[in-house]
Image (spheres, rainbow, N blue to C red):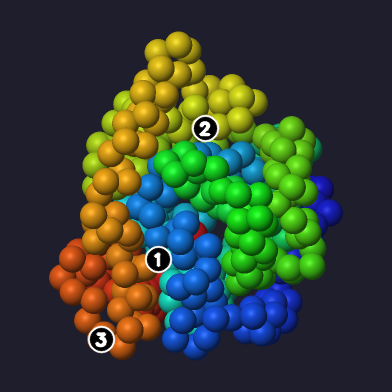
């Protein structure tokens, strides 16, 4: 067997990063980022779902991620539960109280600490037999990067480009998000420009490589994004349209004139219609719950509870795991 040359995120390093997050957090009630942050402004938009498929495929292109999901997750048996777990984690980190965010970060780390195994096939730079871990630092950094980059991409898809200064502010805030996942903030690129370069270099590098297993997972999971609707043709076309060309090819996704036109027409209509939606429906439930919490309102209302059911599978941000229930990727 070959041992991958990797650095592992452990509990001690996570706690060190949580101290960094605490030092810059908005407040105990406001959470890590708070209502004045670009992180809240961007991630409150339901339109971020437009990029969910893209982010998923970018992550699956990392062999450690696709192998860990294939071997240790029940995602293919219950994709709706996976969708809810993913967004529940992300929204607790972003919109939760400081205690909720830290609890979610520690849950995430514990769930991943025991996930390890051996690659079943060659992928990118990694040979079959290479040991992998879900606590691998480079893999966690890549997963965080896909979320940061895709959040900006989908926001700009609807509302136009952020100013250069705003991109840098958002990226600086994203270092706290990465730290919550155990990624040392000092190891990250210093600004948006160099972060974009890192992302481009990763896509071009042999750190990524799409296996047949990754293609199988992608086909099955993309049929369930979101889990309560059948996959519309325009969403599949848009996901492919937003991917880097190399990964379109490696995932074997059709992308001819029909798919390109479908995606471009979808973008035109989204730009016209989405901004007209009332904020009560447009903004995700966890954001509205967080605003109510800061305002001192104990109940955000039935609309927010309903939106939370769609995004989280439960009425509120609080962790609602049954005692002894397994944590899953």
Q: For the point 79% across and 63% down, which residue is it?
A: 187
Give the label, 1 or 3, closer to the camera. 3
Q: How many marks?
A: 3
Q: For the point 40% across and 66% down, which residue is it?
A: 88
- Work out how far the residue at label 1 is from the one at label 3, CA to CA, in angstroms: 20 Å
Among numbered discs 1 and 3, the one appearing first in the sequence: 1
Rendered location of residue 270, percent (x, y)? 34, 36
Among numbered discs 3 and 2, the one appearing first in the sequence: 2
| Residue closest to the eye, 38 or 229 | 38
Residue 312's place in the image compared with 64, above or below, is below
Q: For the point 71% across and 74% down, which residue is it?
A: 10
| Residue closest to the eye, 293 or 312 | 293
Circle 2 Cα neighbour tier, 10 Å, few/some/many (<14 / 14–19 / ≥20): some
Q: In screen coordinates, is 76 left or right of 241?
A: left
| Residue closest to the eye, 51 or 121 | 51
**Residue contact at pointers 1 and 3, CB within 8 angstroms:** no
- Work out how far the residue at label 2 is from the one at label 1, CA to CA, in angstroms: 24 Å
- Does dot 3 land on a helix, a strand or a loop? loop
Residue 23's place in the image compared with 175, above or below, is below
Rendered location of residue 212, percent (x, y)? 56, 30
Give the label, 2 or 1, closer to the camera. 2
**Residue contact at pointers 2 and 1, CB within 8 angstroms:** no
Disc number at residue 88?
Answer: 1
- Residue identified by numbered label 2: 242
- Does dot 1 land on a helix, a strand or a loop? helix
Rendered location of residue 244, percent (x, y)? 61, 30
Rendered location of residue 282, percent (x, y)? 29, 54
- Residue identified by numbered label 3: 298
């Amino acid at each position: 067997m070959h041992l991958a040359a990797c650095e592992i995120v452990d509990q001690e390093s996570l706690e060190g990063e949580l101290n960094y997050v605490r030092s810059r957090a908005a407040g105990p009630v406001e959470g890590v980022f708070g209502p004045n942050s670009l992180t809240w402004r961007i991630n409150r938009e339901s339109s971020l779902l437009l990029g969910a498929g893209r982010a998923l495929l970018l992550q699956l292109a990392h062999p450690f991620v696709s192998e860990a999901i294939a071997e240790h997750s029940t995602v293919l048996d219950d994709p709706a539960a996976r969708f809810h777990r993913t967004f529940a984690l992300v929204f607790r980190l972003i919109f939760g109280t400081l205690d909720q965010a830290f609890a979610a970060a520690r849950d995430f780390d514990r769930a991943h600490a025991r996930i390890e195994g051996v690659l079943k096939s060659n992928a990118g730079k990694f040979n079959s037999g290479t040991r992998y871990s879900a606590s691998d630092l480079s893999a966690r950094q890549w997963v965080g990067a896909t979320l940061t980059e895709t959040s900006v991409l989908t926001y700009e898809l609807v509302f136009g480009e952020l100013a250069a200064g705003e991109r840098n502010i958002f990226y600086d805030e994203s270092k706290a998000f990465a730290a919550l996942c155990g990624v040392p903030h000092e190891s990250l690129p210093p600004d948006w420009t160099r972060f974009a370069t890192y992302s481009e270099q990763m896509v071009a590098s042999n750190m990524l490589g799409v296996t047949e297993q990754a293609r199988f997972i992608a086909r099955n999971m993309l049929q369930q994004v979101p889990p309560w609707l059948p996959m519309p043709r325009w969403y599949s076309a848009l996901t492919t349209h937003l991917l880097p060309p190399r990964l379109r090819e490696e995932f074997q996704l059709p992308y001819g004139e029909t798919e390109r036109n479908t995606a471009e027409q979808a973008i035109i209509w989204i730009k016209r219609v989405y901004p007209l939606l009332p904020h009560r429906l447009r903004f995700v439930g966890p954001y509205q719950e967080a605003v109510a919490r800061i305002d001192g309102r104990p109940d955000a209302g039935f609309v927010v509870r309903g939106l939370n059911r769609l995004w989280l599978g439960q009425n509120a941000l609080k962790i609602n795991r049954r005692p002894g229930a397994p944590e899953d990727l």
